[in-house]
Image: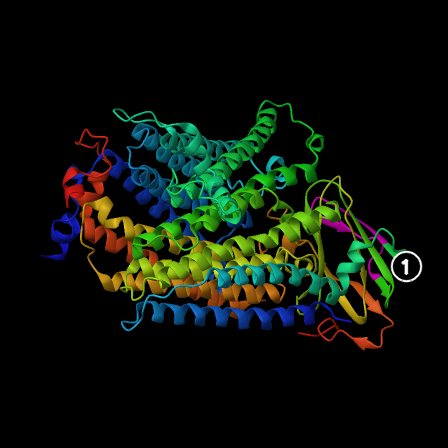
Amino acid sequence: MSFIKTLIQGNEGGLYADGLTPTQKVTLRAVIVGVLYYGLSAIEGMLMRAHAITPLSLFEQNSHYFSVMTVHPIVGIFGSTYLIVFGAFTFLVPYLMKKPLYSVKLANWTWILIAVGALLSWLGGFIFHYAPLYTLYWPLPVDFKQYDAVGGLVFIVGVAVIMVGTLGFIYNIFATVFYTEEGHEKRPIKPLLISALGIDGFLNIWYKMTGREPYSKEPAVSLPVVAIFRGTIDTFLDALVILTCGVLILVYIFGELAGVPMDYTSVNALLYKNFFWWGLDLIADGLVLIYVAGTWYLLAMMITGKKLFMQNIARAALLLELVVSWFVWSHHLLGDQGQPNMMKLVSGEMVTAFELVTQGIAVFITLVTLWSARPLKVTFPLKFLLAGILGFMLAVPAGILQADMGLNRVLHNTQWIVGPHVHVAILVGLTMTLYAAMYTLWPTLTNDVKLWSNKLANLHFWGQLVGGIGMGAFMGMAGMDGMLRRTLYLNGEYETYMLLAGACGALLIVAWLAFLFNVIMSIGIQGLIGVFLPSKMKTKELVPKTQVAE
Amino acid sequence: MADSVEVLGALKLVYTIYTIAIMLLIAWFARGVVAPEGKPSVVKPSTFYGYVGVLVFVGVAIHILTFNKIPWVEIDFKRDSIKADQTFNITVKDHKFTLPEEKLTIQCKNYVMFDVDSKDLTYGFGLFRQNNSLVLQMQVVPGSPNQIMWQFHKNGTYHVVSTEYSGPHGGSEMTLKNAVEVVGCEDNDKYAMLGAK
């Protein structure tokens, strides 16, 4: 088959879009748009990397550079990660619960709202150079001496739209867990709730310790769904906090636009920072870690075909992780001298250190489950899964180290934070876990479309792994030598590190292009377009009946 | 007495060793889990509980170790009860630091308090050596006390830089070169001596 024909029709006939169910389509739509937003975020990151290499300085105005830095995480986290994760879970929760998704229509609105919201926020930065960064330290987002209020309006409305879409996802997930589908006998709420919260895991351990039969031999909810349910609780709380802060900022923006500017000292900056970080940290230290643990468990079970090692402990640990995630935000305020020392010590250091334990448990259980099924085949899901685990094994201890009152004094605000911790966690830990899930679900979601090139998939793997770890490492080294994040160095102060980090960044772009090209060549442009056209199958089934029969 | 150069040097070494060890561990695991001659094996629960115990120990021990080995942690905890030998009241407004004197001169081993007040935005207050390495920093939040106490043990000249983003004109544009000088020590901070790289 000629190259052009394959490009248009896909590999060996490509994706037959008319054969996709509405649930398959909505999942693929969210994931495809999420992958495209990942590319936008990666290109933005690369532009900033290039700007840090002195002769390549790209931005004429600092405001443009910092507006890119402002939208980069919005596009990356919400536009990309949220969409991919929500898309995957929209399929997985009903798939694992063995019943239809509660509402395909709501799932469609979810990805559309998040995609539109991310675009609006991006435009707020691109057109208006609105640049308070994602941390929105009060009163920077309402400092209209520096920023255009209209830009702020576009940006904040964008974030609010993303959060509304997020609430739609949350409702759909909870409803899917609890509702009783047509023709099925009434599903009681209590056992579902106890299982979804993981309380049955605790009870099973307690019953065993007291010499009784297990509380529940067959839990009402499978372990990955427990993780998704728990993570979604944090997603909900986080959405509420971000929406609340968004409304506060909008009030000031409307005041400015109406010619009645308001006094920003009415809001206590430290209190606001505590509130905002409590919510924002539920993403980084809450839902991400919990969702990732759940995804690892699911992948380990799918790859091995075995039950998970220490199931009850895993269930209980997920509940512990949820509670831990509510009390760790102070590690973001270790450099704030107005923050009470006791909060820094207990929340910032000690409770945060428990993330080493909860994430370590997830790593151990996943690896032991895989080991118990030796020998396994070398597959892309397995490779990406191991890379994702490696990413978190590197990034979580880096975070624990910076959440130390002594080390934070010389690490906070440096490239260490965003390098070995944030970018290694996201690019290697989270993203490679998501790719593992994508490669795993690929046959189910595309009705067995054959991947066009294993060589490109390998390039994707190594580019992402080496690029992600390498970039994080060189940023970290620069950070330990004093290079601040969010600060421009245009006199070549950290040139060697920035050149090396830039090369690794370029590798990440190559990896993304390899993946994107491989996907397009596999499903074909026709199939790609077909995913976004209405489904011709009027069914609530998750996959076509023929696939189930096979 | 350890300073940030030594602390970060130790961190660089420890974290590099850890990173290499973890990558080798995963590489070993990846080879082993797909090795055709590999046999399924079961891990005892006691191994798991021992591993969790190690994680708890490491998580707590890091903080106990740094509390005892990094000198500025204890000073920071007790700054309310330690009498400052020197206090510098600094204000920040419109992306500009205003110091009480053009150059702040600090006597060796004095307890010195930097008291920074922001009149508008959230900034950072950091001291940097001549080679741009970081000595100390804190956040400067408007409407909150922003005080950091420090004890210097080596001579040197330091730049004041805002370590927190406060808009496109913050960061490196908020730099006061050679604004702080420590004198009277037996040793020199070699990276903080004028002309050092």
Residue toward you, B157 or A373: A373
* Residue at left offset 17%, top offset 45%: A15
Residue B174 against residue A373 in the figure, above or below: above
Q: Secondary structure at mark 1?
A: loop
Query: On the picture, is A25 further left or further right than B115?
Result: left
Tell me the residue at 21%/31% (across/down).
A534
Relative depth, front residue between A369 and A340: A369
**Quick one: A303 or A34, which is closer to the camera?**
A303
| Residue A292 vertical placement versus A156 (above, below) | below
Q: Is residue B92 magenta?
A: yes
Above or below, B164 against B1 in this view is above
Question: In the rendered structure, which segment of residues is drawn in magenta?
Answer: B88-104
Q: Across the whole image, how many numbered discs are drawn on residues? A: 1
Compared across the picture, whether A476 is left or right of A85 comes to right
Tell me the quarter of the picture where residue A300 sits.
bottom left
Q: Is residue A448 visible?
A: yes
The residue beneath circle 1 is: B85
Q: Quadrant of the N terminus of chain A?
A: bottom left
User: Can residue A510 be spotted in the picture?
Assistant: no
